[in-house]
Image: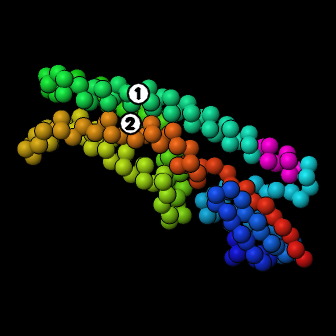
């Protein structure tokens, strides 16, 4: 923000998601500050000096955050509901060894894990892409890279097992659906992870 014309100083607190900016109102406006923040990969709301307007803006901010958390909770429920059978089926061969060679097992694991990877994980993909566009990495990147790799290897082992066999490898040893779904479910339960998806708030202190 200090690179924006008219900005004299900026103090950002990531813990409270607030930024206080001192500007020359004749050279800078709120829109330019918001654009600068959005280019950095965050959203922004401007807090007015008027108490009534400020209260209304903060109320909208709380409503947006509550909506986001409710959506994330739904994704968590789906991820957890599918992660449990995925993990049980992945480890069932420890009790029933014959399941290791069951032809249907990889496909059922794929069916359990795919909705978690595609739908429950969507906010993390959006956050990781936003970070990548700004040449940064964050917790979204960490979650996406790890779980997508585990899922992708599992899918290849499921549908192209012959390639593994041709290389002298057992494709059933490369099914990591349980790892992918469990980590996704855990990430959905930690709303601070997709922080980049939430809207930070800008508080402006204008000076002449």
Q: For the residues labelled 1 and 2, say whether their Cβ atoms are less than 8 Å apart.
A: yes
- Picture quarter containing residue 30? bottom right
Q: Is residue 57 magenta?
A: yes
Q: Is residue 196 left or right of residue 59?
A: left
Q: Secondary structure at mark 1?
A: helix
Quadrant of the frame with the C terminus = bottom right
Q: Secondary structure at mark 2?
A: helix
On the image, the x and y values in percent for residue 154 come to: 27, 39
Task: Judge whether residue 102 can be spotted in this image.
Answer: no
Q: Is residue 48 above or below residue 120?
A: below
Q: Which residue is mark 1?
A: 82
> In the image, which residues are magenta?
53-60
Quadrant of the frame with the N terminus = bottom right
Which residue is drawn at the image coordinates 32% and 35% (left, top)? 178
Q: Which residue is mark 2?
A: 181
Q: Is residue 52 above or below residue 179?
A: below
Task: Judge whether residue 79 can be spotted in this image.
Answer: yes
On the image, the x and y values in percent for residue 68 come to: 63, 39
Which residue is drawn at the image coordinates 85% and 47% (left, top)? 55
On the image, the x and y values in percent for residue 159 come to: 23, 35
Q: Is residue 32 left or right of residue 37?
A: right
Which residue is drawn at the image coordinates 38% and 36% (left, top)? 181
Which residue is drawn at the image coordinates 44% and 30% (left, top)? 80
Q: Is residue 73 above or below residue 204?
A: above
Which badge, 1 or 2, comes first in the chain's sequence? 1
Q: Is residue 35 magenta?
A: no
């Amino acid at each position: 923000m200090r690179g924006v014309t008219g900005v004299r100083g900026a103090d950002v607190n990531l813990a409270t998601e607030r930024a206080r900016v001192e500007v020359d109102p004749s050279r800078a406006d709120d829109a330019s500050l918001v654009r600068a923040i959005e280019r950095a990969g965050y959203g922004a709301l401007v807090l007015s000096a008027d108490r009534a307007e400020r209260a209304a803006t903060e109320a909208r901010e709380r409503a947006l955050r509550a909506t986001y958390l409710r959506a994330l909770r739904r994704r968590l429920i789906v991820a957890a509901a599918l992660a449990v059978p995925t993990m049980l089926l992945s480890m069932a061969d420890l009790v029933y060894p014959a399941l290791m060679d069951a032809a249907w097992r990889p496909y059922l694991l794929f069916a359990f894990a795919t909705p978690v990877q595609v739908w429950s994980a969507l906010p993390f993909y959006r956050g990781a892409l936003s970070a990548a566009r700004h040449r940064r990495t964050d917790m979204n990147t960490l979650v996406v890279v790890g779980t997508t790799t585990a899922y992708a290897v599992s899918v290849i082992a499921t549908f192209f097992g012959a390639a593994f066999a041709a290389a002298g490898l057992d494709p059933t040893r490369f099914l990591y659906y349980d790892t992918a779904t469990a980590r996704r479910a855990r990430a959905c339960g930690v709303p601070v992870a997709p922080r980049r998806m939430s809207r930070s708030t800008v508080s402006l202190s204008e000076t002449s």
